Amino acid sequence: MLDFIYYPVSGILWVWHKVFGAVLGADNGFAWALSVMFLVFTLRAILYKPFVRQVRTTRQMQELQPQIKALQKKYSKDRQRMAVEMQKLQKEHGFNPVMGCLPVLLQAPVFIGLFHVLRSFNRTGTGFGGLGMSVEENANTPNYFFSADDVQSFLSARLFGAPISSFITMPRETLESFGAYGTVPSVANIAAVSIPLMILASVATHFNSRASVARQSPAAAANPQSAIMNKLALWVFPLGVLVGGPFLMIAILLYWVANNIWTYAQQHIVFRRIDAEESAKKQAAMERRADTAPKPGARPTRDKRKRQAPQKSSPAVNPESGAKDKAADKGATDQGTEDKTESADASGESTNGDGSTPRPPKPRPSTNRPRSNKRKRR
């Protein structure tokens, strides 16, 4: 039913087994263990870009948290309108919540596929997932990409005396099926390999969760839901590895350890890179502000232009008509002067020695004359 998952997982595992088997030997337990670990590294390398998007989405969600809370408060009674406004906000900022959980969603099918492929190397049991095959039938049945020879190589491989598909609580009859291709593993041998891997996986899970919690903003850490999830990630999940470890195959524990090692290294690299990008953006913004800001002691320049008062347009004057008017005024003035001279001679008024009439005294300006309210008497 899930062959579209089982075949790709078994194919990647087959490729890495061929690589390490050519160096260490096909039946070597370390070759199979490294094949499982590099299956994890291959998957995480494919999911590197989605992981970076997940980190950016988480950062963006923290930045948009005040606006999201404002929308929730504003449309608390109208869920439909609130959903529309939330989608509009996400579209404006290019925010996609699905990217925050995409790497986890893609890892889950791989974990299920790896568990099924490893369990299918030994199908002699009758319990959960067992097909009740005989030892010969199981050894001669291919396992997806693995041929019958590869299945027999897997059954013969030992990691410190324990098959990597075995687990502490494995039934006794299933353990005895490994005897046809090597020694029958004991529970002590399996525990000697599984328990250190369980502790290592638990500690690695705790430190990865601790690194993630340390990068949360104070507002996100103060959220009650976030506080509960942080406690689960810090203590419950690592404890779950210790409690569920006896029921997990050694190969699954190797998968868990390898996944946590990659996560720890990837987190530090990605977060350091994103922090450097954000600090560079802040530095560039501060430099732009410094360039546009006025220098110390200088007055800030105003962008508003002073409005100039509109000048009244004087009527256009024709120069020819103006000259004619001046000439006419001069002629009228000369005529008036001659008339005044003749009238003065006729009336017998005194004249100057040259015959010209003396100029009357200039009247005082009206502003200098004293004003009197008294009427002049006749």
Image (tube, rainbow, N blue to C red):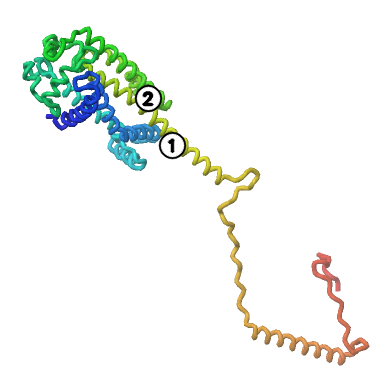
The quarter of the picture where the N terminus appears is top left
**Amino acid type, mark 2:** Ser
Q: Circle 2 sits on which residue?
A: 212
In front: mark 1 or mark 2? 1
Residue 230 placement (x, y as % from top left): 35, 21
Tell me if 89 is positioned left or right of 114 in this view.
Answer: right
- Nearest to the observer: residue 138 or residue 2: 138
Tell me if 18 is positioned left or right of 50 in this view.
Answer: left
Tell me if 25 is positioned left or right of 134 in this view.
Answer: right
Q: Residue at x 12, y 17 (%)?
A: 128
Q: Residue at x 14, y 29 (%)?
A: 145
Residue 238 placement (x, y as % from top left): 31, 16
In this rendering, is residue 266 above or below 312? Answer: above
Tell me if 298 is positioned left or right of 113 in this view.
Answer: right
Q: Secondary structure at mark 2?
A: helix
Residue 377 placement (x, y as % from top left): 86, 71
Q: Quadrant of residue 214?
A: top left
Q: Circle 1 sits on which residue?
A: 277
- Nearest to the observer: residue 52 or residue 234: 52
